[in-house]
Amino acid sequence: MTLLITGGTGTVGSALLQRLAGQGVQVHALTRDPARARFPDGVLPVAGDLLDVPSMRQALSGTRTLFLLNAVTPQELTQAMLTLNLAREAGIQRLVYFSVFNGEAFTNVPHFAAKHAVERMIGQLGIPATILRPNCFMQNDAQFFRDALLGPGLYPFPIGERGVSMVDVGDIADIAASALLQRERAAQPLPTEVVNVVGPQALTGPGIAGIWAELLHKPVAWTGADTAAFEARLAHHAPAWMAMDMRLMLDRFCADGMAATAADVDRMTQWLGRRPRSYADFAAQTVAAWRA
C-alpha cells in the first residue's frame, strides 16, 4: 500500500516529499506529466489531474493514505469533492487534508469557504482524517516582497494590526509528514483530529516592518492597510478573481486578525518536539541567503 501526495510540486508539497523520502514508505506523487516531474529519489510520479476522474481512479487504486492539497483555483471545491468521493470509492480510510486557519469564520473569502466546505464533507463521508489548518506562510513575504524590502525599504503586505500568527513552511511540512506517517503506520484508522498549524506569535504590519528594519540595518516602513490598492497591484500579475480573493482575505485579517491561541502554540510544540519557528528567525535566515 502507498501514500498518494497531491500538490507535490508546490511550496508545501515539495517540502513534504523531501521529508517523506527515505522513511520506509512507498510514496506516489500526483503530476499531470510524470516524464517531466522532478521528485526526490524514491518518490514515484503518478499521472493524474484532480478534474480528470479516470486518471484519479487509477491514481487512487491501491492507495492506503491520501494527502489532499489542492491549489487556490476557481475549481478548488469541485477538485476536492471529486477526489474525496473517489477516495471513499477506493476504500481509503486514512486522509490528511490541507485546509486553512479560520475557514469556518471567513465565510466571504472564496478559498476559505471552499476549504471549510471540504472539511464538512469529510465529516459527512466519515473518512478518518487529520485536518491541517495552516495560518499565513512566512515564506510568502520573501517570495513576493524581496524587491520592496531591499529597495525602497517597504513592507507592502496589508495584514493589519490585529495579529496574524504566520507559520514557517518547514514547520507545516514537518507536521504534515508526521500526520501522514502516523496514519499510514497505524494498524487501524485513527480518529479524526484538527490541528491549527501556526507560528509562535501574532504579527502585525508595523511589527514585521520593524523586524526587517533591524535585520537590513535601514528604515523599513509598513505601507498600511489599503487592501484595495494591494488588489489593484496584484491584478497586474494574477487573475482578477485571485486578486479579489486575496483582498477579501486581507480585509478579514485587518478586521479580525488571524491570531492563534496559546493552546494552539502548545499543541504545535508537542507535534514538533520544539517551539514553532519565529518570524525573526525566518527573516534572519532569509536576509543571510539574500546577502550570500
Image (spheres, rainbow, N blue to C red):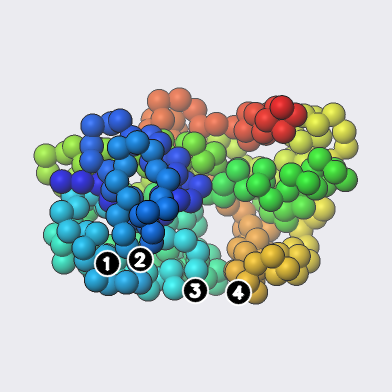
Against 249, residue 6 (above or below) is above
Kindly indicate whether the residue at mark 2 contacts the one at mark 1 (C-beta within 8 angstroms). Answer: yes
Near mark 1 (Cα within 10 A), the count class, few <14, some 14-19 or many ≥20, is some
- Residue 136 in sight here: yes
Near mark 2 (Cα within 10 A), the count class, few <14, some 14-19 or many ≥20, is some
Near mark 4 (Cα within 10 A), the count class, few <14, some 14-19 or many ≥20, is some
C-alpha separation, residue under disc 3 versus residue under disc 4: 8 Å
**Label 2 sits on residue:** 49
Residue type of the residue flagged with mark 4: Trp
Against 215, residue 251 (above or below) is below
Question: Mark on residue 241?
Answer: 4
Against 66, residue 188 (above or below) is above
Residue 229 in the image, given as x and y percentages of width and height:
78, 66
Q: Residue at x 75, y 29 (%)?
A: 291
C-alpha separation, residue under disc 4 versus residue under disc 2: 22 Å
What SS does tag 2 mark?
loop
Kindly indicate whether the residue at mark 4 contacts the one at mark 3 (C-beta within 8 angstroms). Answer: yes
C-alpha separation, residue under disc 2 versus residue under disc 3: 15 Å
What SS does tag 4 mark?
helix
Q: Residue at x 55, y 31 (%)?
A: 277
What SS does tag 3 mark?
loop
Q: Residue at x 19, y 52 (%)?
A: 63
Q: Earlier in the sequence, mark 4 or mark 2?
A: 2
**Label 3 sits on residue:** 74
Q: Earlier in the sequence, mark 4 or mark 1?
A: 1
Residue 9 in the image, given as x and y percentages of width and height:
45, 50
**Label 1 sits on residue:** 55
Q: In the depicted view, which residue is nearer to us: 285 or 53?
A: 53
Q: Residue most toward the left?
A: 187
C-alpha separation, residue under disc 1 versus residue under disc 2: 7 Å
Residue type of the residue flagged with mark 3: Pro
Q: Earlier in the sequence, mark 3 or mark 4?
A: 3
